[in-house]
Image (cartoon, helix red, strand yellow):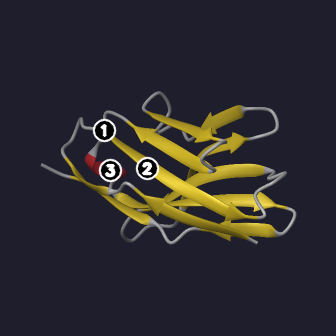
Amino acid sequence: QVQLVESGGGLVQPGGSLKLSCVMSGSIFNLISMEWYRQAPGKEREAIAILLPNSGVDKYKDSVKDRFTISRDIAKNTLYLQMNSLKPEDTAVYYCTTLGATGRSWGQGTEVTVSS
């Protein structure tokens, strides 16, 4: 199993930036994918960014493309989501998730509120 702990959420003004972190532990070798999801109030959880660690390929949901960047620090076992030019519609609970041989694991989420 993989344990995931997110941090970095908070209140930010429109146009601002936040960097979310997700510390990974446990069976983190040979993960198939590392992803960020979010769930806005009253909406379903949606995938917004994915990183394929074996190839380094990353992909994004259209609504966050060119504003958000997924990355990882191998030495720190940490996955990141850099979020720039934040909009009120980015308000949500953000979750990191991994897919590996032992299945999918989820963190507890970190809340991001974009408001003036």
Q: Are marks 2 and 1 in contact (CB under 8 Å)?
A: no
- Residue identifier under label 2: 20
Point out residue 41 in the picture as x, y percentages from the top left corner.
36, 68
- Residue identifier under label 1: 17
The amino acid beneath tag 1 is: Ser
The amino acid beneath tag 2 is: Leu
- Residue identifier under label 3: 89
- The residue carrying pointer 3 sits among few (fewer than 14), some (14 to 19) or many (20 or more) residues within 10 Å by Cα, namely few
Point out residue 7 in the picture as x, y percentages from the top left corner.
42, 59
Q: Give the spatial CA distance, label 1 vs label 3.
A: 14 Å
Please name the residue shown 52% across and 45% down the image.
80
Point out residue 54 in the picture as x, y percentages from the top left corner.
82, 38
Label 1 vs 3, first from the N-terminus: 1
The amino acid beneath tag 3 is: Glu
Mark 2 or 3: the one toward you? 2
Point out residue 10 in the picture as x, y percentages from the top left corner.
28, 57
Q: Is 107 on the left or on the right of 28, as rendered?
A: left
Residue 116, above or below 62: below
Please name the residue shown 65% across and 42% down the image.
75
- The residue carrying pointer 2 sits among few (fewer than 14), some (14 to 19) or many (20 or more) residues within 10 Å by Cα, namely many
The part of the image, by quadrant, that contains residue 104 is bottom right
Mark 1 or 3: the one toward you? 1
Q: Which mark is residue 73?
A: none
Q: Give the spatial CA distance, label 2 vs label 1.
A: 10 Å
Outermost residue to the left: 116
